[in-house]
Amino acid sequence: MKINIWSDIRCPFCYIGKRKFEKALEKFPQKDEVEVIWRSFQLDPKLQTQTDKNLDEHFAEYKGISLKYAKQMHNRVAQIAKEVGLTFNFDKAVVANSFNAHRLIQFAKTKGLGNKAEEQLFKAYFTDGKNIDDIPTLIKTGTTIGLHEKELNEVLASDAFAEEVYQDELTALRVGVRGVPFFVFNDKYVVSGAQPIDTFLRTLENSWKEFEKETGSLITMEEQACSVDGSCN
């Protein structure tokens, strides 16, 4: 059974949703029969990398709110992340375009390392305060999960896997992705946002029951997510 997940490294609820989904998958008896496919989605393709700003400062400017209020909002998200075992350091996170990070993930997928790439890049961005648009940082991240440095240099020095990123985003439009994370189970059930673990588990169970049946209309459940206008709630 296939599960397609549209996600952006810059989306906090994508990391939280990933962890909740994984906790549900661990409880799923048929977990070894599930294929997870990570799909690229950029919340802000035109974002300029700004190494002199952290996410608190960028968010305050972008939304036209005070720095204090931006910090309060991010603290609430950090608390939600903590509840599933994640550490978010918004004050350390570098404002960075995620396009090259998505190219790295697409390359990693060809080596069976897509999930590891997602995890390492999320950690680099939200926990470690790394610049995910910096080529040396991406190469180091890639080698950490088992990719070869020479191949990484060749990929990231070119426009390799750019088309794969664009194709995922076009598919997202056709599927109806309005925010991320966006999970499509067995081409039938949709879970939008960082849903509770039990919701993911029920969807896994329902999808499995219909695994060999003809797909029908998408059934959607929504929860906390990051929308295409940059809002995360």
Image (cartoon, rainbow, N blue to C red):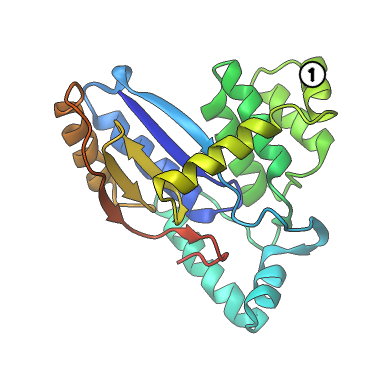
Quadrant position of residue 5: top left
Residue assigned mark 1: 149
Viewer-nearest residue: 89 or 189 = 189
Q: Is residue 68 above or below residue 112?
A: below
Quarter of the image holding residue 148?
A: top right
- Answer left or right for 92 relative to 222: right
Residue 207, position in %: x, y?
A: 21, 32
**76 or 103: nearer the viewer:** 103
Q: Is residue 170 left or right of residue 60?
A: left
Image location (x, y in percent) of residue 32: 31, 17
Give the residue drawn at x 35%, y 39%: 184
* Element under disc 1: helix
Q: Is residue 191 visible?
A: yes
Residue 189: image quadrant is top left
- Single out the residue that lies furthest toward the front: 174
Q: Foreground: 227 or 141?
A: 227
Task: Please name whichever residue, 12 or 158, is drawn nearer the observer in this view of the structure.
Answer: 158
Q: Position of residue 36 (x, y in %)?
A: 41, 27
Q: Residues within 10 Å of mark 1 (few under 14, many from 20)?
A: some
- Residue 40 visible in the shown view: no
* 120 lies left or right of 197: right
**Residue type for callout 1:** Glu
Image location (x, y in percent) of residue 144: 68, 25
In the rendered view of the protein, which quadrant contains the N terminus?
top left
Q: Dividing the image into 4 quarters, which one contains the C terminus?
A: bottom left
Number of numbered discs present? 1
Instruction: Identify the residue at horizontal 25%, vertical 31% (top origin).
Output: 27
